[in-house]
Image: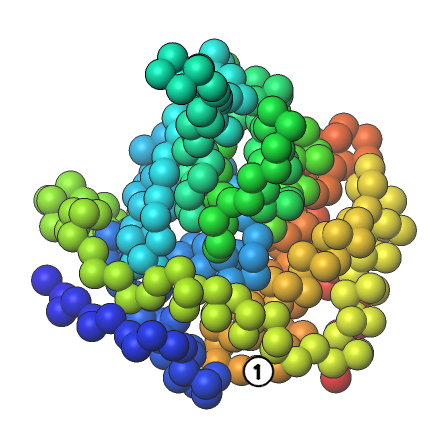
């Protein structure tokens, strides 16, 4: 058993290198419970630091729920899980008002969305009407219900899991909802050593987590991520990437300005994870496939675009020196 790191102080370090060390500790601690998935943990943390949301697409039983629970525990953030089903209603997520006989008035009972990390498990098994209940919350960090607008806790981070669309009983997510997710990634099968540890019961229980951060420090980290310096020529590089997606002829439609903003936020967070307070072209390239993959479709078939096709378009864009 690895030693459990001690919780950090009430504020995050000022130096980028010290911040990177802190975040590396978060990744390592989460990796105690999600074995052999350090790249995916890093991407999940990057998504949170960039104030985005995360879509994980994979078959059941890969560890998607474990990743969400472990990350919430290490970050010290409250966590709720909803199991999406075909008969779920929007009120099951957002909450409802119940008439109280004693007070002769309605009392609002908040739903599971009023949390800091929400796991929407198998989101594409619920109907489009219920899927759309998450749209305002993900974009505006608030819920409008019964004539009142209620803010959500900060930070607010949605991790949604999605079964492959060829599996039975799934409803494809509309493009407007896919666009609310900063990243889409897959976990994939564990390597042989990680799977051996899982089968042998060597993985530690997810309940045995010592938080390394809390809500206030996560908010500090998000602010630090968005203060990472972005040079003008990198803004031009991102514009060139957006234009390439629109003019290539391979895709039904190109990346939107919102996708460009998402790419910049993610690149800043990736640079912070690397211990820098400035963005390099490599930061943009690292996050680009996870930002763009779920936002693009083939021009002829409207099928999803794979990594090789993305690379064929984006590698032709000149990289600034």
Q: Can you say whether 130 is above or below 9 in the image? A: above
275 versus 185 height, above or below: below
Q: Which residue is mark 1?
A: 277
Residue 188 visible (yes or no):
no
Q: Residue at x 44, y 15 (%)?
A: 104
Q: Quadrant of residue 60?
A: top left
Residue 205 visible in the snapshot: yes
Q: Quadrant of the C terminus?
A: bottom right
Residue 214: quadrant of the picture: bottom left
The quadrant of the image that shows the N terminus is: bottom left
**Quick check: 13 above or below 60?**
below
- Left-right relation of 124 to 304: left
Q: Nearer the viewer, residue 127 or 291?
A: 127
The percent position of residue 173, horizontal first and vertical second, equals 62, 29
Residue in the picture at 20% in, 71% down: 5
Please identify the residue farthest to the front as the structure is shown. Answer: 103
Q: Position of residue 273 (x, y in %)?
A: 48, 72
Element under label 1? loop
Q: In this view of the protein, which residue sits in the foreground, 217 or 131?
A: 217
Against 163, is 265 above or below?
below
Q: Residue at x 72, y 52 (%)?
A: 259
């Amino acid at each position: 058993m690895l030693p459990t790191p001690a919780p950090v102080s009430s504020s995050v370090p000022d130096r980028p290198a010290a911040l990177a060390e802190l975040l590396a500790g978060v990744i390592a601690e989460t990796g105690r419970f999600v074995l052999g998935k350090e790249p995916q943990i890093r991407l999940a943390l990057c998504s949170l630091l960039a104030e985005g949301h995360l879509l994980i697409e994979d078959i059941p039983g890969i560890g998607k729920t474990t990743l969400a629970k472990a990350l919430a525990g290490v970050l010290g953030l409250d966590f709720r899980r909803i199991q999406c089903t075909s008969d779920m209603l929007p009120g099951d997520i957002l909450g409802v008002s119940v008439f109280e006989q004693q007070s002769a008035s309605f009392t609002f009972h908040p739903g599971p969305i009023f949390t800091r990390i929400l796991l929407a498990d198998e989101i594409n098994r619920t109907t489009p009407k219920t899927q759309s209940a998450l749209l305002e919350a993900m974009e505006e960090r608030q819920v409008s219900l019964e004539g009142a607008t209620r803010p959500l806790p900060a930070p607010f981070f949605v991790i949604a899991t999605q079964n492959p669309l060829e599996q039975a009983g799934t409803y494809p997510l509309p493009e407007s909802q896919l666009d609310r997710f900063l990243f889409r990634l897959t976990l994939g099968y564990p390597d042989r050593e990680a799977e051996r540890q899982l089968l042998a019961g060597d993985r530690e229980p997810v309940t045995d987590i010592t938080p390394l951060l809390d809500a206030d420090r996560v908010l500090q980290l998000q602010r630090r991520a968005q203060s990472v310096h972005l040079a003008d020529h990198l803004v031009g590089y991102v514009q060139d990437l957006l234009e390439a997606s629109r003019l290539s002829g391979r895709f039904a439609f190109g990346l939107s300005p919102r996708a460009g903003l998402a790419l910049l936020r993610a690149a800043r967070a990736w640079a912070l994870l690397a211990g820098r307070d400035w963005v390099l072209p490599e930061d943009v390239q690292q996050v680009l496939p996870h930002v763009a993959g779920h936002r693009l479709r083939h021009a002829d078939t409207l099928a999803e675009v794979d990594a090789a096709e993305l690379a064929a378009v984006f590698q032709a864009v000149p990289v600034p020196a």
